[in-house]
Image: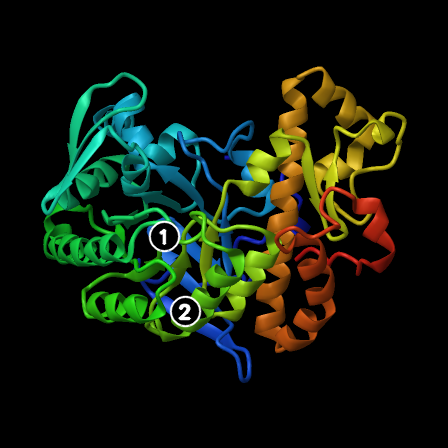
Amino acid sequence: MTTRADPRLDLSCETSGLQPRPPGTFEVLAQAPGSPARAGRLWTAHGPIDTPCFMPVGTYGAVKGLDADDLREVGAQIILGNSYHLGHRPGAARVAALGGLHRMMAWDRPILTDSGGFQVFSLRGLQKIDDAGVSYQTHFDGSRHRMTPESVLATQAALGSDICMILDHCPPADAEPALIRAAVDRSTRWAEEAARRRGEILQPGQLCFGIVQGGTNVALRREHLKALAGLPFDGLALGGLSVGEPIPEMHATMAAVGPEMPQDRPRYVMGIGTPHDLLAAVRSGIDMFDCVMPTRHARNGQLFTFSGRLNIRQSRFRDDDAPVDAACRCRCCARYSRAYLRHLHEQNEPLYGRLATIHNLYFYQQWVGALRRALRSGRFEALESEFLSIISTVYAEGAAGEGNVDEVADAAVPAPEPA
């Protein structure tokens, strides 16, 4: 398949001439001295993933507004799909009959699918949980369904994703301690069942990740981690974060638990976050993360730069002929002005969403790629020091610089060079 990607922007595989390795092979390529931060490579049936890695979210089998060439151009190595939504619409059997999710999307790189459990547990009043699974009504047509540790793996087997997440019980951030305890115990039983049945349900080459729960209770997280670390999963994730808990508590939980996750398997934090969150995750030894923030914020007029967020809806951009970020080499910044983007947004023109999403995803890949290259070259401490002040200042929770990019531009450091 042809692609219009500029080779300078291709962050998918930073070492040429690699010999393929069996799916599930994970290599730690570099470790920051005196820090859990590390760079690695995970092999899948659709090629390698260089870590740390940010995964754009394609809930319905598409990252909104972008095609496969766009995703390769911004440097996406792997994307995330939602098996709850895809399993119902268009349906896992239909996807399988059409050749699987990769073929439908014309995407030849890895795909991770979540179990859909988070979506089901969010259907308060429409679901009933028991020790064997959860019965629920869909939010879109009210039809009744059943989700079990086996059924979510079967759905993902039909979709053909490279990395399959198990069913876990994710309670809300404000849940009572007793409910969090019960959710951990239930998630352990479901993990044991998934580990026992994965070999007979998943297709050859499909990987399976377990999910550690426990809220921000570090002792409970460690207990659950110990229970799951001995099971035959290809990687482990921290779930149940970024669900409403204070940001400092989320970062503290990652810092405490991340370095204790198995060294020889990839570590994933689900559903984070801001550029500051990603830095905190990498510091904690995390390898993979995903979030809807760059794509959703793009559609809502919020554009990310190394000087903070720019709100394109502001009237001051009406006659601004500058690009979103003069240092950015994405297609949006290379060709279009802030004034044009504001005009497109104001007129609800679909082209705005496409261009803004290209920019935001390029920014995220550029940021994580800079961390990855710094780890490989032994410069992580220097880059962290160089970028921490601006990233933590303009992207920390409630930071004054958000949405006011010009006021912090003088303090910003230059964007890192593309790979």
Q: Which mark is residue 240?
A: 1
Left or right: residue 417 compared with residue 39: right
Q: Residue furthest bottom?
A: 34
Q: Residue at x 84, y 46 (%)?
A: 406
Q: Which mark is residue 258?
A: 2
Q: Camera-side residue: 307 or 202?
A: 307
Left or right: residue 9 compared with residue 118: right
> What's the distance in space between the residues labelled 2 and 1, CA to CA?
14 Å
Residue 357 is drawn in which quadrant? Answer: top right
Label 2 residue SS: helix
The residue type indicated by label 1 comes to Gly
Q: Mark 1: give few (<14), some (14-19) or many (20+) Cα within 10 Å.
A: many
x, y (%) of residue 301? 68, 31
Label 1 residue SS: loop
Q: Residue at x 37, y 32 (%)?
A: 103
x, y (%) of residue 21? 35, 62
Q: Camera-side residue: 300 or 207?
A: 300
Q: Quadrant of the C terminus?
A: bottom right
The residue type indicated by label 2 comes to Gly
